[in-house]
Image (cartoon, helix red, strand yellow):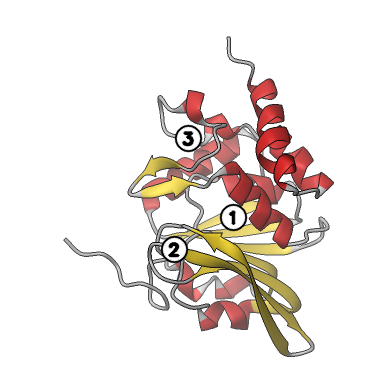
Amino acid sequence: MTDWEDLRRDMVEFQIAARGLSDSRVLATMREVPRHLFVGRGMEASAYGDHALPIGEEQTISQPYMVALMTAALRLTGQEKVLEIGTGSGYQTAVISKLADRVFSVERIETLATRARETLDTLGLTNISILVGDGTIGWKEFAPYDRILVTAGSPAVPISLIEQLADPGILVIPVGPRKMQQLRIVEKRDGIIEKHDEGGCAFVPLVGKDAWEVPTG
């Protein structure tokens, strides 16, 4: 019988903490959330590996370290309202939901949104709302958001997301060409926007009105 708890502990120790990430709340949450429930059927044994995995619809569940890095960059205290763009499997959503007050997540692919909702409900995570739609235009109804996390690569930071970011607020997004991006941290404070990059990353494209075009054919 697989000891999922041991696998999560090893994932955190050897893939995340060993790379220098020391946010104790993020590390504790990564030890807790059952990542194997969010991967594709038959891939559970690979869930805790140091890599991304396909989840169908040409989308992926991000590498554990990248999930931890992006979550830590949000600097969550437990009081925040968070907008997530790209629900995907729902794994990152679950991690954030345990560290923030409320999560609003937008997913453009309905089958993924439905599957994620079912998994999150199974885990009893009740502070998450999911919308099927174009994440590049955000979710205006509940704006502003204390934090915004984008889990797909964009050619630039969508202006709608900047507008929906609270002041003060933090936005984390991969920015760059389709194949390789920089993880960009955007901070809004007193009406001033500051940006800095945390290093290279590779995400599936952010598709929508204010990012990459919807693929055809």
Left or right: residue 3 versus residue 154 is right
The image's mark for residue 39 is: 3
* Camera-side mark, 3 or 1: 3
Front-lying residue, 163 or 158: 158
Quarter of the image containing the N terminus? Answer: top right
Q: Above or below — where is 60 with respect to 154? A: above
Residue 129, numbered circle: 1
Measured in 3D between alpha carbons, the distance from the residue under mark 3 to the one under mark 1, in whole angstroms, is: 20 Å
Q: Residues within 10 Å of mark 1 (few under 14, many from 20)?
A: few
Give the labeled residue for mark 2.
Answer: 180
The amino acid pointed to by label 1 is Ser
- Position in image of residue 65 (x %, y %): 62, 46
Q: Amino acid at mark 2?
A: Met
**Front residue of 97 and 1:** 1
Is 21 rendered above or below residue 46? below
Please identify the quadrant where the C terminus is shown.
bottom left
In x, y percent, where is residue 122? 59, 33
Distance from disc 2 to disc 3, alpha carbons, whole Å, reads: 23 Å
Find out whether the residues at labels 3 and 1 contact each other: C-beta distance under 8 Å: no
Choose top left, top right, bottom left or bottom right for residue 56.
top left
Where disc 3 sits, the SS reads loop
